[in-house]
Image (cartoon, rainbow, N blue to C red):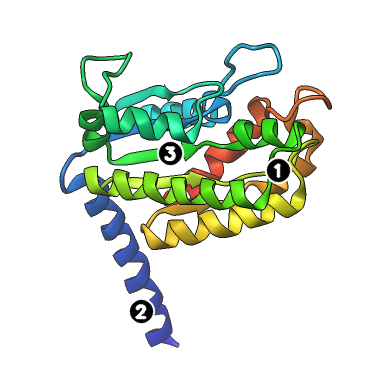
Amino acid sequence: MRRKYKLILIILVSAIITYFIYFSSRDTKINLIALGDGIASGETPYNIDGVSYNDYLQEYFENKRLLKLYNDSYAYKNYQIDDLLEDLKSNITSKNDNLNMQQLIHKANLITISIGEEELTKLAITNDLNKDYLKDYIKEYDHLLYMLKDITEAKIVIIGYYENMYLDKSNVIILNSEISNLAIKYDATFINISDLMLNKDYYLNDKTFYFNYKGHKEIAEMIIHSLF
């Protein structure tokens, strides 16, 4: 019995040491970069940004006195994956500072990505979302992660997809399965948020697929739990 407790203690201590080394060996502070569309920026049905899960992460790390940098220049409504890839290839300059995009990504030690929910939902509305498009989209996501891993050693957290009044469950299952496999391939963390759509308290009204602050807070908590 004592050996069992000793083994558990060793595992816990090892986990704490691993976390400490990850965030402290190179830089004692966290450089958080948010990438994505309106889900990442906290978009609301009223065409304004509310509080996003990234904002809650910023607040959390600030309260822990761990945050050095937070940049969400590349998280805004209708930002699509091909836009993100093009900006990364072109190495454009960040709106929030004088760093180009690749410099900013290189400085990061934590990157969150939530992209595609808006784009794919719009395609679903016009009946233009099909298996071929999904296949190409997943290839683009693969390329995005490949480029990011080539630039940075940061921890990458990928936010999955969820069913809404236009994006059906079958497509969400395919997307989450394929993107979670990519997360494994590139040593990233995949956060499955598909169950959040079941909670009506996470929406401002029943005519939008954008989460309210409660939904975003839940996503932030899921990310924090995955990190610690």
Compare residues 157 and 215 and report the one nearer the observer.
157
Reading the image, the residue beneath label 3 is: 112
* Dot label at residue 196: 1
Q: Residues within 10 Å of mark 1 (few under 14, many from 20)?
A: some
Residue closest to the far left: 26
Residue 141 spot, x, y in % from top left: 45, 46
Compare residues 218 and 172 and report the one nearer the observer.
172
- Separation of residues labelled 3 and 1 (CA atoms): 18 Å
- Separation of residues labelled 3 and 2 (CA atoms): 36 Å
Q: Quadrant of residue 45?
A: top right
Relative horizontal placement of residue 8, taking residue 102 as reference (left or right): right
3 vs 2, front mark: 3
Q: Earlier in the sequence, mark 3 or mark 1?
A: 3
Q: Which SS class for mark 1?
A: helix
Relative horizontal placement of residue 105, taking residue 177 as reference (left or right): left
Q: Residues within 10 Å of mark 3 (few under 14, many from 20)?
A: many
**Residue drawn 59% across and 59% down?**
177
* Dot label at residue 6: 2
**Residue drawn 40% across and 75% down?**
8
Q: How many marks?
A: 3
Q: Which SS class for mark 2?
A: helix
Q: Quadrant of residue 199?
A: top right
